[in-house]
Amino acid sequence: MNLLDAHGEALREFDRTVHQISGGQWDAPTPCSEWTVRDLLNHLVSEQLWVPHLLAGETLAQVGDRYDGDVLGGDPVGIWEKSSIAARQAWTEPGATDRQVQLSFGDSEATLYGWQMTIDLAVHAWDLAKGIGAAQPISAEVADTLLPIVTPQIDWWQGIDIVAAPVPVPESASAADRLVALCGRSPSWPA
């Protein structure tokens, strides 16, 4: 899968999972130990809100703190839908992946940013599914595409506290289980 195809599928996987959240699950724990279901969705919505700005060439200072705190308001699913549609439109604009963007660690190619967003969508779809008791959402094709992209970055991500240490899994584990384990999650969570 190329970047835009993988991103589109990971976004759909996360979206399908969001639409399975029931009213009583917003405070449920997730594998992200400090985040409830609502906190996790808030994180992903905030990330989607940043995309159009960064792909348009705005700096972190220009965006500022407008997406800090609670961005979900009283309609978490509705704001997810709006923010994810706008983010996807920004990614699929002609030439979007050829741009430079400013990220927290400096200027970067938009493709690196795109792969990071895709990985985040896929892994957090899994986190969200675990938190609400839904089926594992990551397709084998997405996981197979992301594994070779994630693997060389794990040590760096651990060093800047983006992910926990990888969790050992058997060689026979599915690609999705290997992906989430590489990102510090136990595929058998919460056991």
Image (spheres, grey):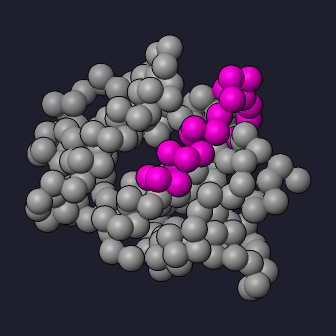
Drawn side of residue 122 relative to residue 48, left or right: right
Q: Nearer the viewer, residue 106 or 110?
A: 110
Position in image of residue 57 (x %, y %): 11, 45
Drawn side of residue 4 relative to residue 72, left or right: left
Residue at (58, 51) in percent of width and height = 125
Residue at (59, 45) in percent of width and height = 17
Residue 123 showing in the rendered view: yes
Residue at (24, 47) in percent of width and height = 89
46 versus 14 height, above or below: above
Q: Nearer the viewer, residue 49 or 80?
A: 80
Drawn side of residue 175 relative to residue 74, left or right: right
Query: In the rendered picture of this protein, how many numbered marks are placed on residues?
Result: 0
Drawn side of residue 60 relative to residue 143, left or right: left
Query: Is residue 122 magenta-colored?
Result: no
Identity of the residue furthest to the bottom in this view: 171
Q: Quadrant of residue 49?
A: top left
Identity of the residue furthest to the right in this view: 191
Query: Is residue 18 magenta-colored?
Result: yes
117 versus 156 height, above or below: above
Position in image of residue 39 (x %, y %): 58, 30
Identity of the residue furthest to the top in this view: 74
Position in image of residue 188 (x %, y %): 82, 60
Residue at (48, 36) in percent of width and height = 43
Q: Nearer the viewer, residue 133 or 158?
A: 133
Q: Quadrant of residue 85?
A: top left
Residue 102 showing in the rendered view: no
Per the rendered image, the range of residues in magenta is 11-30
Considering the image in quadrants, where does the N terminus appear?
bottom left
Q: Nearer the viewer, residue 22 or 52?
A: 22
